[in-house]
Amino acid sequence: MKKLFALIVLAVIFYYWPYTPQKFLIWDDEAILSGYKYFNPVNLQNFLELWLQPYNGLYTPVLKSLWAVVISVLQVTVGYDWAAKNVTLPFILINILLHAANTGLVYKLSQKVLEFFDKSKPVVTANFVALCFYAFHPLQIENVNWIMGTKELLWIHFALWSLLFYFRDQKTFTLLFFFLAVLSKPTAIILVPIFGLLMLLRNENVFAKKNLLLLLPQALTGLALVLWTEKMQPSTYSAAVSEKVLGAVDSFGFYIGKMVWPFPLSADYGRHYQWLQSQGWKTWEQLICVVFVLVLIVAYVKFKSERKFLIFLSALFFLPLLTTSGLIGLSFQTYSNVADHYASFSLIPVTLGLMLMLTKIKKPWLTGAVAGYILVFAVMGWSYKEAWA
């Protein structure tokens, strides 16, 4: 598997490498990188300010520290006019390397998860095909080829480490990487209920001292960041509770459909509240969501031996989507209630589920069919890279 994984990493670098000159996009790149006063220039005083001041409605000092290091190198090697010269390659290269590393961490985590929930002997071809699904799914293109995608890739990177250390029963490192994740993007607070759920699935007492020492710091940090983010990034459109539920159901169905068939891709899908109001309860995405939930309920009842695994995957899939579903107001909802990068973490449970399915069924024709489907994805997705150039 090590050789196959090395092949995937090389393929990730080749696939996502920008073959046309990149430029800073008006959509966030210019304002957050070249236009941020604490990056102009990067010095000790400004670096410390990165940890004291939120920006663009988010407190993400770990993310900004990474960018500060890159910019400081560019200021020395290229000059203080690095932004005017459109020196974007270092930022894209970081995204590519983070995505390659995340693919490796998904593999490591899958071994721990399947060992705990299933006990099936790993099948190399199943692991390889499922990892290719994660590595080359077209929903990853926005994260890897858009400079601002770093925030998604970085929090997912630290979240994967946190989950991995949890399964290794190394609670100190679990907590450390949780904080790194949540300080990269507040979405990482979804790890709090996930860890609580894992404790229940492992038949542990959530209120035991060792577990409270893990959960309480996470919960308090998460609550503070949720309240802060909602205050700093208010939606410019005030929606009723019924409209928020409508938007959430629609967004869940949207992402479920995108997992299976992600095209067409877009930076702005225009599915804002006004559009949802005009549609009512009549979109295909809402039907997809309802059908998917019914299928999950049937699976919980029928596959008793995999029930815990299915519950875990369901939590991994829905919790990150819940934070951006419209139930909590965010400024981007003015344009759309959905975006490709919101679904990044939810690709992980789909990958784990695909891995288990191919391991259990062990039909070469099925593995080959899935591999062919992924190849079609990758080929079709290639052309969409240009949208982020």
Image (spheres, rainbow, N blue to C red):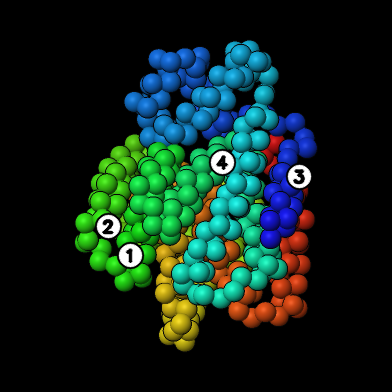
The quarter holding residue 362 reads bottom right
Which residue is tagged 4?
149
Q: Nearer the viewer, mark 3 or mark 1?
A: 1
Mark closest to the chain's N terminus, 4 or 1: 4
The reply to whether the C-beta atoms of the residues labelled 3 and 1 are less than 8 Å apart is no
Looking at numbered disc 1 in the image, what kind of residue is underneath it? Met
The crowding category of the residue bearing disc 2, from other C-alpha atoms within 10 Å (few below 14, some 14 to 19, many at least 20), is some
| Secondary structure of residue under mark 4 | helix
Closer to us: 187 or 294: 187
Looking at numbered disc 3 in the image, what kind of residue is underneath it? Phe
Q: Nearer the viewer, mark 3 or mark 2?
A: 2
Mark closest to the chain's N terminus, 3 or 1: 3
| Secondary structure of residue under mark 3 | helix
Does residue 320 appear in the picture of this structure? no
Residue at the farthest bottom position: 302
Mark closest to the chain's N terminus, 1 or 2: 1
Label 3 to label 2, Cα distance in Å? 43 Å
Looking at numbered disc 4 in the image, what kind of residue is underneath it? Gly
Left or right: 119 as drawn, with respect to 216: right
Which residue is tagged 2?
211
Mark closest to the chain's N terminus, 3 or 2: 3
Identify the residue shown where x is 51% and y is 46%: 157
Q: Which mark is residue 332?
A: none
